[in-house]
Amino acid sequence: MRPLAAECLPPSWAASRFPAGLPAAQGLIAAGLLDRVGEDGAVRDGCRSRVLESALTLALLERHGHGHAGARARLTRYLECHRGGGLLDGVFAEAALGQRERPLRPEVFDAVRDRVPDFAGARKRALVHALLTMLGAAPGREDGEPAAFALASLHPWAAVQVTAVKVVLGRAAGKPPAAAELALLASTQRRGIVWEGNLLIHLSVLHALAGLPGMGATVEDGLRTALLHQREDGGMPFVTDTDTWSTVTAGLALHTAGAPRRILHHVARHLVTVQQEDGGWSYTDRARLSDTDCTSVAVEFLHQLDPRAYRDAIRRGTDALIAVRGPDGGFPTYGAGTPSEACMTAAAVNALSTMERPPDAVVRSALHHLVNSRRQDGTFPPGWSSSRLHTFFRVHLAIGHSGRQATPAVRVMHERITSLVCADQRADGGFGQQDGSRSDAISTAYGLIVLAGRPDPAPAARAARHLLSHVRPDGSVDSPPDMVGPRPFPYHVPVLAGAFALLALGHLTSRIRPVRPLAPALAQRTRAGAERTLERTLP
């Protein structure tokens, strides 16, 4: 996600073409992120409550919980406030509250089918049916396609989730679970610990086990563990945290903004300590399963900061990426043998391009995979963002960082991406997640990264002006959530909006000459934030 080298970009733009408040806003966002750097070097911000996990927790308490009256009341109030949410949120909230009287609309399943990759379609349909069964609102019997329960080529999280879904649907149809299935589910339960930091899987397992002989204590302990993460608003989050993903993203963004190197090294040293045994990184230090996204961005950040000081960690990271490469030349999100995905393939190419001698055959085949991954309209299959511009900007950068590998087909793909992004820009200068969506800050940041590589500064200036309108006085950025997990359910970690906004502004300012200094007051605040962090964390 790092900016392209100057030699890969058109000539610089005059600073006069852009909003006068650009340096001030950049400094303000940077100061807000610097304030987030903790004593251990991590950038932390809690995952906010989500209707899905809140509904599952309340349903579990209503049917199988004993006590927890306070937690139950707070969950009820949270869900009452979210009954009028989006299609899926409204269905889940009403089901958990026992207020679903009308038949379930078929577009509930259509909304899932259209927003997940083809290889996951059967699994996600079964997942939604199982979730509704857990909430007591299933629309009749659903055995599911055999592909929905196949464990081959699944990473550990998906294997546990699929097994929980199979047990829930099987029990609803009168089929007892197999001993091996129960053993796998029970193995994820440890008092006080949410397995891999994933509350959705944790709650799904508890629903699968609830009411089975000998599982009462396990379910009660699991409920108590889940409620340790109940948020102040009464709801439950998707995951305990995304601290490592937030750290790598914010670290790279702060580097583009010229943040103090001593703090950036403090962030980097934290990342080295949470690197997994296989050389990769996971989204949180509570999880053991590394992923291509976190690993790729961590490699880019460490390389940008100091490729010599962190050469061992970088080498282990690139080795971990190459180890999961698929036979089709693409890269999956999780683990070797799982399906390749366009966004993750682009992420891996960006990381591998930092190598002194990038493996040409690997990069070429990855770019070829991206060419073959496109849909007829030039877009890519859904990734881990609600915004289609997320994959666009990652692919745009991958092509730019590996320019000497660009075949005619790759160049055509690049031209198509940039034309789609330019066509997506709204009258207000911003970008939305999909056709018909309102402009939002994160999608605008993604679009701005692509526009920053174009010859004409006017579209980038308009996007920058729109993005700056979403910057709050405290340096945070107002934006709806765009990250999804599991697909297609969005979750919200607010610090990521600031990180991507700052990253986009870093791409933009790398094109602008002369560079405007930060406004004096905000430069002082940035320094003050840096000094506070240093006082907390460094001798």
Image (tube, rainbow, N blue to C red):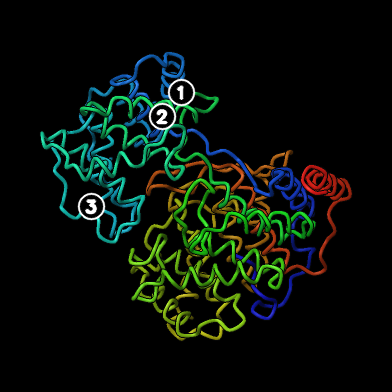
Q: Considering depth in this image, is 370 or 176 the residue closer to the camera?
A: 176
Mark 1 vs 2: CB contact within 8 A: yes
Query: How many circles with numbers are drawn on the protein?
Result: 3
Residue type pointed to by label 1: Tyr
Horizontal arrangement in the rendering, residue 401 relative to residue 266 (left or right): left
Mark 3 vs 2: CB contact within 8 A: no
Of callouts 3 and 1, the N-terminal one: 1
Horizontal arrangement in the rendering, residue 212 relative to residue 97 (left or right): left
State the SS at label 2: helix
Horizontal arrangement in the rendering, residue 390 relative to residue 368 (left or right): right
State the SS at label 3: helix
Numbered label attached to residue 122? 3
Of callouts 3 and 2, the N-terminal one: 2
Q: CA distance from mark 3 to mark 2?
A: 25 Å
Residue 370 appears anywhere in the view: yes
Q: Which residue is mark 1?
A: 78
> Residue 313: horizontal and vertical position, in percent?
61, 66
Residue type pointed to by label 3: Ala
Residue 107 appears anywhere in the view: no
> Residue 62: horizontal and vertical position, in percent?
32, 19
